[in-house]
Image: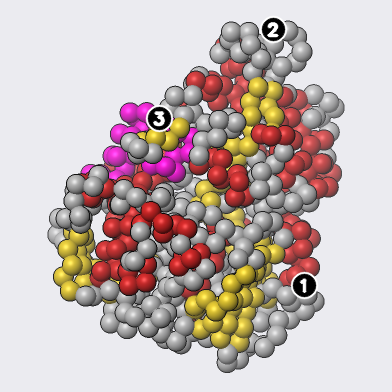
Amino acid sequence: MKKKHGFTVFTLLVVLAMLLSACSGSTGGDGKKSASSDKPKEDISKFPLQVKNNKKEVADGSLNYALVYDTPFEGTLNYAYYEGQPDAEVLQFFDVPLFSTNDDYEFTNDGAATYKMSEDKKTITVTIKDNVNWSDGKPVTAQDYEYSFLVIGNKDYTGVRYGDAIIQSIIGMKEYHEGKAQNISGIKIINDKSLSITFDNANPSLLTGLWPYAMPKHYLGDVPIKDLATSDKIHKEPIGFGPYKIKKMVPGESVEFERNDNYFGGKPKLKTIVAKVVNPKVILQALKKGEVDVAEYPVDQYSAAKGSKNFQFIGQVDLAYNYLGFKLGHWDADKGVNVMDNPKFKDKRVRQAMAYALDEKSVGEKLYNGLRFPATSLIPPSFPSWYNPDAKSIGYDPEKAKKLLDKAGYKDVDKDGLREDPKGKKFKINFLSMSGGDIAEPLAKFYMQSWKNVGLDVQLVDGRLAEFNSFYKMVEEDDPKVDIFLAAWSTGTDVDPYGLYGSDVPFNYSRYVSEKNDQLLKDGHSEKAFDHDYRKKVYDEWQDYMNDELPVIPTLFRSTISAVNNRVTELKANYSADPYIWAKVGVTNKTAEEE
């Protein structure tokens, strides 16, 4: 599953210190360190993975969960259609996947459904357990699981999940997608609770990356697929089979959940959960006042919260990374392919130079308290088997950036301090960056100053930051005003990067296309890739290749920390990857602790 993240906010004082520091050293000045550079850095490995609370839980408690954003959540509350992280955080409470997972993110048979693989590893048979029901009491059926594939594969589907390599490899999916068949021939209904799915080839990602979500056909089936994304049944009155169900919603602001008595996993401990948007500027105060029990906490604000008495922190390295993307082309929706036809950044030396100009080590240390650190590849270290720490990554070297631009023909012809293109014309780069509190603008200015230091004229699109929803609208629709954009990916639990960088997937927002990239991605989920050493070799080569081509620049790996009120029990740091955790979470007091 792929999720989009906006940038969390920082404190203005710290970023200004960084801006001053960045203008010294290798970029000029006296080279003195800023005071903030000497403060101790945090180590994510020292954060506990689970809350500590051994007190007796109270019955029928309630919990307040913070959606830490400075904008409303969009409210596309269906896994086949949502795209923003805020919606994913709402979804986790009332809808869950069919499969549970182990610590390596592989499916197990402990969840809502069991599976069995064929000997040739090309067919998986899924059986939904008898006591699994939608929150309206109707049983979850094999037809519901089939329906999710019929929706995603339909030519009228308006979401972005069809780009998934595993979905596309289902036998008969292509013919169905092209409108040549009424059903997907590789999906066979055995009975109301079982179905089989057969694939063109065996894929080692099948048990980490197979689409695991059913959709309630009895509830959504009367809505034309072309209209599902905007339907009230998804935006205002969605249903699921998770531990809670929606009782009340204030669109974009809050959702009140109540216990789902039909939940297959047994009676959830809490009676109600309220998820509400809380601005990052006030999240610390909300936690101290006991207004919020759980919040994914902005790591840049950790120093201010450290030592708080009424809540504790849990954390881990995230399945995510920040990146800078280049707009190299556009998405051809009719053909379902990316087209790399924008010549502005065709010369990869320009892309490399822009990467060499960025001091990400200082960003991680001075802004994120060491809880983010320079990204060296497009596979994060949270996949220890596949992350290559020796990948040929680009570091901070502004002098090398200048030399690359010189060789590419980008020189300051009119001596105004800014480079012209090889034809002697003004070379302006339009930069799309997201809003996110007081720090967002100074941070964007820091990046722009870094590029100006090597002679590049980079300006914000429309002269201002974009809020979350309009930001991704411009990125997804390939707005011609956008040359580069600053964003982040949550990779999901499947290491296969095809769903983000394949030539025929809409999530490939840079619109990068190359035969070698496609071949390496294909090799990475081929039958041969069941051999661990072979797959490791392929992904090592892919990481080196993308670090050279740089259609996107990986900027920061992310540690994620959550602030949890002392009354909360059972919550683990990986709760976003554990689909069944919220049924187990309880509280030991009726009201939250205050500081």
**Residue 351 rendering spot, x and y as whole percentages:** 55, 26
SS type, badge 2: loop
Residue 279, position as x, y percentages in the image? 72, 60
Judging by the rendered image, the residue that carries numbered circle 2 is 413
Residue 455: quarter of image? top right
Q: Residue at x 63, y 8 (%)?
A: 424
**Mark sitting earlier along the chain (3/1):** 1
Left or right position of 143 against 231: left
Q: Amino acid at mark 2?
A: Val
> Which label sits on residue 339?
3
- Position of 427 with respect to 491 (left or right) is right
Q: What quarter of the picture does the C terminus occupy? A: bottom right
CB contact under 8 Å: marks 1 and 2: no
* Start-end of magenta stretch: 504-530
Pointer 3 with pointer 1, Cβ within 8 A: no
| Residue sitting nearer the eye, 72 or 200 | 72
Under mark 1, the amino acid is Lys
Task: Give the residue type that dot 3 points to.
Answer: Val
Q: Quadrant of residue 101?
A: bottom left
Between 133 and 216, which is closer to the camera in this rendering? 216
- What distance separates the C-alpha of mark 1 from that of mark 2? 57 Å
Q: Which mark is residue 288?
A: 1
- Which label lies toward us, 1 or 2? 2
Q: Secondary structure at mark 3?
A: strand
